[in-house]
């Protein structure tokens, strides 16, 4: 018997399914199911620092990019499509700044962030770059 104040569960109840995917901008650890890798010849990572992940996928018919980013300590990875033209889509990857005086761990994490596009990526080249923490 469940303790007082706890909902009881019937033996036939199905466990709640976890939500599928995450809304654009919300980081996750795994690449969402159904994502398609951006072909290497359509992924320009020359502007990324050494050791930064170089992994990108499309989803929702190419209208959403799922990009492996980098964050650490109290920071959180951010991604924004800063340029979208007929040849390229430029995505700026950055990180939030830690609050002054806040104690933070010194770990590095590699979440997958989603970046919505105005139009599907299609045959355009995806250019990834980084900017300082915001």
Image (cartoon, helix red, strand yellow):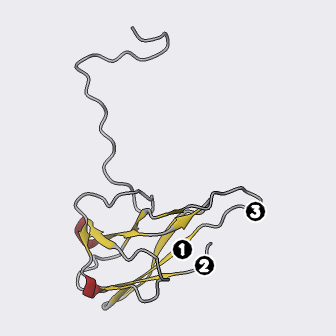
Label 2 vs 3, first from the N-terminus:
3
Give the secondary structure at mark 1. strand
Looking at the picture, tell me which residue is in the foreground, 72 or 95: 72
Name the side, left or right, on which 34 lies relative to 49.
Answer: left
| Mark 2 residue crowding within 10 angstroms, few (<14) / some (14–19) / many (20+) | few
Instruction: Please give the residue where the numbered disc 3 appears in the rendered image.
Output: 100
Label 2 vs 1, first from the N-terminus:
1
The quarter holding residue 10 reads top left
Name the side, left or right, on which 36 lies relative to 132.
Answer: left
Q: Residue at x 49, y 69 (%)?
A: 70
The quarter holding residue 58 reads bottom left
Instruction: Please give the residue where the numbered disc 1 appears in the rendered image.
Output: 94
Q: CA distance from mark 1 to mark 3?
A: 18 Å
Give the secondary structure at mark 2. loop
Q: Residue at x 46, y 83 (%)?
A: 48
Placement of 94 over or under 32, stated as above or below: below
Say the numbered circle drawn on residue 109.
Answer: none
Give the secondary structure at mark 3. loop
Q: Quadrant of the C terminus?
A: bottom right
Residue 27: horizontal and vertical position, in percent?
A: 44, 59
Instruction: Please give the residue where the numbered disc 2 appears in the rendered image.
Output: 132
Q: CA distance from mark 2 to mark 1?
A: 6 Å
Q: Residue at x 25, y 65 (%)?
A: 35
Name the side, left or right, on which 30 lies relative to 97.
Answer: left
Q: Are marks 2 and 1 in contact (CB under 8 Å)?
A: yes
Looking at the picture, tell me which residue is in the foreground, 87 or 53: 53
Looking at the picture, tell me which residue is in the foreground, 56 or 20: 56
Residue 37: horizontal and vertical position, in percent?
A: 25, 72
């Amino acid at each position: 018997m469940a303790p007082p104040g706890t909902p009881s569960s019937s033996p036939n109840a199905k466990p709640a399914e976890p939500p599928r995917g995450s809304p654009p901008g919300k980081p996750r650890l795994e690449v969402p199911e159904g994502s398609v890798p951006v072909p290497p010849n359509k992924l320009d990572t020359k502007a990324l620092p050494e050791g930064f992940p170089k992994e990108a996928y499309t989803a929702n018919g190419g209208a959403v990019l799922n990009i492996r980013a980098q964050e650490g300590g109290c920071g959180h990875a951010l991604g924004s499509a800063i340029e979208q033209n007929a040849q390229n889509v430029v995505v700026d990857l950055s990180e939030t700044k830690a609050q002054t005086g806040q104690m933070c761990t010194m770990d590095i994490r590699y979440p997958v962030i989603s970046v919505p596009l105005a139009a599907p990526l299609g045959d355009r080249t995806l250019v990834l770059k980084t900017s300082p923490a915001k």
